[in-house]
Amino acid sequence: MNAIIASAVVTFAAQADDDHLSAALDDRPEGLNAGRTTFWPGESPAFLVWSSLGQGLGTLEIEAVGGSLQVISAHPNAVKEKEQDVLEYLQKDQLSYEISLSPPAFGLPTFVSEYGPAVTVEAVKTYRDGTIGGVLLKRATGTAGQWVIGKLKWESRARSYKIQTDSEDLDLERAILLATGTPPAS
């Protein structure tokens, strides 16, 4: 009996920057898989899906391959805390630096400075559902080049799903979550 490869596949027909769709195995230590990323036939790998679609905003379809789909939460409520290291040199006249967030933030991220000038955080990319996909780190003056070093921290909220695999299928090799999104017509 071999371990099951659990993976997510996303198909997204985005025409504008107003929407987002991403999916991943829930690898949070306190998450639905308790930090596990290896599964056996009969077990149920859990996935997180981040999307501005669904609930009247375009369509979001979730399917399972290698088992039956179990909806844990059809509304974004599984919390995943994210942080991203920032190590950027701002040139003499450069006052800001843009950072993309994946998955998108629920609320404005915070920046914890370890070195460099004080910076503020501003949202520069907001999706249709109000989540934030990009921020600008801004410093007040740009009279000299300076390093900005620290951590950008945010919280994301995702929908959650499990794929119930068959314990009798000892040849099962994959459990795949398929997420397909179509934005609303303009």
Image (cartoon, rainbow, N blue to C red):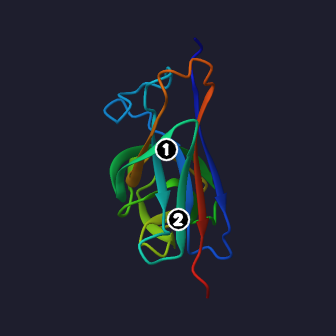
Q: Relative to 50, is 31 above or below?
A: above
Instruction: Using the rendered view, name the quadrant where residue 96 is placed.
Output: bottom right
Looking at this view, name the residue that lies furthest to the front. 168
Residue at the bottom extreme, as displayed: 186
Kind of residue at badge 2: Leu
Which is in the foreground here, disc 1 or disc 2?
2
Q: Residue 104's x, y, as percent?
A: 48, 58
Residue 151 appears in view? no
Q: Quadrant of the N terminus?
A: top right
Q: Amino acid at mark 1?
A: Gln
Label disc, if present, on residue 101 of the rendered structure: none
Compute the Cα span from label 1 to label 2. Answer: 28 Å
Residue at image coords 66%, 58%: 11
Along the line of sight, the residue nearer the viewer: 185 or 66: 66
Quadrant assignment, res 87: top right
Circle 2 residue: 60
Q: Nearer the viewer, residue 90 or 32?
A: 32
Residue 158 visible, this orientation: yes
Tell me if mark 2 has few (under 14), some (14-19) or many (20+) residues whose alpha carbon lies within 10 angstroms of its own. Answer: some
Q: Position of residue 56 (x, y in %)?
A: 44, 78
> Where 54 sits versus 99, above or below?
below
Q: Residue at x 49, y 26 (%)?
A: 37
Residue 77 at x, y percent in the picture: 31, 55
Q: Is residue 151 left or right of residue 19?
A: left
Asked if disc 1 and disc 2 are in contact, CB closer than 8 Å, the reply is: no
Residue that label 1 marks: 84
Please give left or right for residue 64 compared with residue 32 in the image: right
- In the image, 81 versus 68, the foreground residue is 68
